[in-house]
Image (cartoon, rainbow, N blue to C red):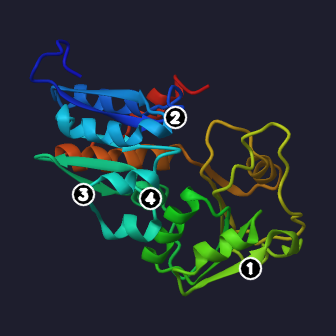
Amino acid sequence: MSKNVTADTKLLGIFGNPVNHSLSPIMHNDWFAKYKLNCLYVAFDVLPENLKSAVESIRSLNITGVNVTVPHKIEVMKYIDSVDNAAKTIGSVNTIVNKKGKLYGCNTDWQGFITDLKSKNINLKNKTIFVVGAGGAAKAILYALTKLKVKHVYLTSRTFDKAKLVAEKYKNISVIDINKVSASFLKDIDCLVNCSTCGMKKEDKLPFTIKEFNKKIVFYDIIYNKETPFKKFAAKNKIKYFSGEGMLIYQGAVSFDKWTGIFPDTKKTLPLIKKFMR
């Protein structure tokens, strides 16, 4: 960020509610400073009933772009001019680019997931994946998995009908009732991706019993900065485990690239945001 905010400073930000916990301002302002860009990124706490007027302000205030987080990722699609194919399929927008008053929406979550996998040398091609959860994050992950040419995806959620609805868009997804996941189900799974809220509360427990599992299985948990049940199980059983900080950073990096034309160096971003995690 420029030391002096002037009339020429480009404004960017994030719309959410609540949004005071967001690490996006830390990341983006650090990248602006690194590349000497006269830009400022701020967090806007936008109530649901004010979302339409907030989107209109992107045009009226000539805001360069915004990220969109819960609970606005779906609703915001009503108020922008264009949505790319990935965001349409996923069903949500997390990034808006303002091009001369025209607002273009996209979803960078799926790209953040893929980029993080590559950074960790995780190759899921022809692998069997088990996705837990069927919310917005799961939709982005499922879209990413189709791009990675996985062999098959099993999807489960606390709400079976919700999972079935999400899976309808894809050919190679089987939906499983979470209450019918057997204790040996993970024997044939190469990667488990937790997209559920399991782990956000201290009292949370694994949503199913695990007694047998593929010794080479990888756990990828989109939750970060929490001792989730998946993290605890992985540590106890010496399973390779990754949490969601990388996806967070890389989805932001893709957004940054869309706004500035620069894909930022992210090597120092994780140590930076860890200072602000709570």
Judge the density around disc 1: few (<14), some (14-19), many (≥20) Cα neighbours within 10 Å: some
Q: Dot 4 lies on which element?
A: loop
Q: CA distance from mark 4 to mark 2?
A: 16 Å
Q: Amino acid at mark 4?
A: Ser
Which is more N-terminal, label 1 or label 3? 3
Residue 92 circle label:
4
- Residue that carries the numbered disc 1 in the rendered image: 188
As shown in the figure, which amino acid type bears the numbered disc 2? Asn
Give me the C-alpha separation between circle 2 and circle 1.
40 Å
Q: Position of residue 247 (x, y in %)?
A: 48, 50
- Residue 190 visible in image: no
Q: Nearer the viewer, residue 79 or 36?
A: 79
- Which quarter of the picture shows residue 208? bottom right
Q: Position of residue 224 (x, y in %)?
A: 61, 41
Q: Is residue 184 left or right of residue 125?
A: right
How far separated are the C-alphas under marks 4 and 1? Answer: 31 Å
Q: Is residue 178 left or right of 133 when viewed as pictured?
A: right
Q: At x 33% / y 57%, what residue is drawn?
A: 106
Mark 2 / mark 1, whichever is N-terminal: 2
